[in-house]
């Protein structure tokens, strides 16, 4: 398996190269967006790990946006010290498949890469659709049969995560990790509360209850297609 790591911090890049090599990856390193462009244009990669904060005029988000615009659908995992929910949404909006906040456990990085590889290279449309339920991350709008659904930023982030993982069983801890800030130190009960809020918002727009509860496990977005 061939992996591209886009990271300007020499020490971090070296740690990632050694750790991923032990996992059986062949790893190339690019220190900025320009080098990363040259790399993907000359070499096919199975996955990309990209830091958000890169030197020069292009950030990791800019590079990922260019990468998708060029028609490349290789899985991309973003690394970022910015863990506010809006920063996470921005990362997904630019075309990234997943993100991991710094500092992180290497085992989690490896596990997320394996999960992305299982999904494979599939085109990610700009709009997320599940039957008549449509979510537009760029415009930050959700619609049911064309009718706009009023959502708070947190409710939108929760629906966004469900829409990106249709049919997957999502545990409360996983939802908490992806939708709430890295520094959040509350309980997972907040997930249940906000799922309730989201169900109410969807129901007010006429949408059926598409969020299935798996007692003792978590939640799953039902398939409406």
Image: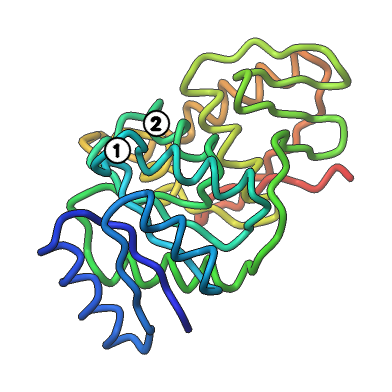
- The residue at the point 52 percent across, 14 percent down is 152
Query: Going 45% across and 60% down the picture, which residue do you hit?
Result: 38
Q: Residue furthest left?
A: 11
Disc 2 is placed on an element classified as helix
Residue designated by label 2: 190
Number of other residues with Cα within 10 Å of mark 2, as a class: few under 14, some 14 to 19, many 20 or more = few
Q: Which mark is residue 92?
A: none
Q: Nearer the viewer, residue 188 or 176?
A: 176
Q: Estimate the x, y position of residue 45 in percent, counting from the top left.
A: 51, 72
Q: Residues within 10 Å of mark 1 (few under 14, many from 20)?
A: few
Please tell me which residue lies in front, 30 or 189. 30
Secondary structure at badge 1 equals: loop
Residue 182 lies in quadrant: top left
Discs 2, 1 touching: Cβ within 8 Å: yes
Q: Position of residue 135 (x, y in %)?
A: 70, 28
Frontmost residue, 62 versus 148: 62
Classify residue 57 by image quadrant: top left
Disc number placed over residue 187 in the picture, else none: 1
Q: Residue at x 56, y 21 (%)?
A: 197
The residue lying at 73 percent from left, 34 percent from top is 127
Distance (Cα) linking label 2 and label 1: 6 Å
> Image quadrant for the C terminus?
top right
Left or right for 43, reference 99: right
Spot occupied by residue 18 in the image (x, y as percentages of width and height): 20, 80
Q: Is residue 1 toward the left or the right of residue 49 in the image?
A: right
Please give left or right for residue 43 compared with residue 139 in the image: left
């Amino acid at each position: 398996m061939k992996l591209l790591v886009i990271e300007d911090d020499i020490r971090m890049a070296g740690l990632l190269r050694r750790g991923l090599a032990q996992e059986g990856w062949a790893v190339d390193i690019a220190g900025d967006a320009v080098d990363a462009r040259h790399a993907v244009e000359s070499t096919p990669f199975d996955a990309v790990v990209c830091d958000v904060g890169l030197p020069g005029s292009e950030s990791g988000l800019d590079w990922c946006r260019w990468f998708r615009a060029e028609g490349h659908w290789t899985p991309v995992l973003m690394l970022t010290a910015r863990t506010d929910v809006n920063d996470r949404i921005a990362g997904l909006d630019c075309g990234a498949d997943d993100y991991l906040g710094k500092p992180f456990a290497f085992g989690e990085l490896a596990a997320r890469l394996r999960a992305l590889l299982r999904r494979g290279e599939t085109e990610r449309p700009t709009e997320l659709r599940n039957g008549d339920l449509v979510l537009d991350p760029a415009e930050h709008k959700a619609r049911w049969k064309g009718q706009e659904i009023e959502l708070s930023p947190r409710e939108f982030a929760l629906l966004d995560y469900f829409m990106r993982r249709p049919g997957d069983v999502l545990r409360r801890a996983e939802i908490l990790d992806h939708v709430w800030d890295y520094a959040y130190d509350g309980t997972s009960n907040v997930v249940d509360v906000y799922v309730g809020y989201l169900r109410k918002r969807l129901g007010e727009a006429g949408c059926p209850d598409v969020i299935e509860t798996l007692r003792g496990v978590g939640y799953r977005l039902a398939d409406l297609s």
